[in-house]
Image: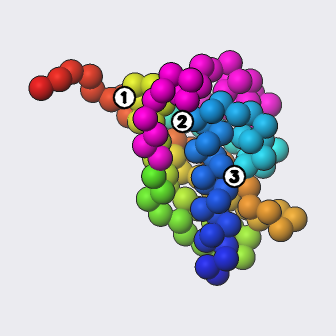
Amino acid sequence: MSSALNDLQGVISEYFEALYQCDTELLQKVFHPKAIYATADEAPLLYRTMAEYVPVVAARTSPASRGEVRTDAIDEIQLAGDNTAFARVRCSIGNSDFVDFLTFVRDEGRWQIMSKIFQIKPRETGGT
C-alpha cells in the first residue's frame, strides 16, 4: 500500500498547488467531477458542486500573486482499502487557516478527491 500513499501524497501536493496558484485546470484534475465542497462554518451550511466551486477559485486573487507564505501540511492519510482513502490536511489563504478533511476515491486507476469538508480558522492579527 506504500504506492497508494505515494500517489495520494502526490494528489494532495497538486491540491495545495492548485489552491496556492488558483489553478482551476489542476483543481479539476485532483477533484472528481462529482465531488462536493462543504463547511458548516457559514450559515446556512455552505455546499457546492464542482461546477459551483471552480468559478469561485477562478475569481480569487491567488495567494501566490500576493506572495503569501505556504503553510501546507498533511496531518494524516488513512487507507480504507484499494480504492478509498481519507486525509486531514492544513493550509492557509489570506487571513484564514483551514483544516480540510478530504476523502478520496480511486476511479479508473487514478486517485481523486471526492469530498472536501473544511473548518475555517481565522488567524488572529496583532503583534507582540
Within 10 Å of the Cα at label 1, are there few (<14), some (14-19), or many (20+) other Cα atoms? few
- Residue segment shown in magenta: 43-72
Residue 116 is drawn in which quadrant? top right
User: Extreme bottom residue here?
Assistant: 1
| Of the pair 30 and 65, the residue shown nearer to us | 65
The x, y position of residue 44, in whole percent, is 55, 24
Q: Position of residue 118 (x, y in %)?
A: 51, 41
Could you say which disc has been placed on residue 39 in the image?
2
Task: Tell me which amino acid carries mark 3.
Answer: Ile
- Quarter of the image for residue 7 reads bottom right
Q: How many marks?
A: 3
C-alpha separation, residue under disc 1 versus residue under disc 2: 14 Å
Left of 86 or right of it: where is 96?
Answer: left
Helix, strand or loop at disc 1?
strand
Q: Earlier in the sequence, mark 1 or mark 2?
A: 2
Type of amino acid under label 1: Pro
Q: Residues within 10 Å of mark 2 (few under 14, many from 20)?
A: some
Which numbered disc flags the more N-terminal residue, 1 or 3? Answer: 3
In the picture, which quadrant includes the N terminus?
bottom right
Q: Which residue is mark 3?
A: 113
- Do we see residue 105 in this rendering? yes
Say which residue appears at 61% left-offset and 42% top-offset. 17
Residue at image x 61%, y 79%? 2
Q: Is residue 109 left or right of residue 17?
A: right
> Regarding mark 3 in the picture, which secondary structure is present there?
strand
Quarter of the image with the C terminus is: top left
Q: Which residue is mark 1?
A: 122
Residue at 63% from the left image edge and 46% from the top image edge: 15
Image point (67%, 77%), residue name: 3
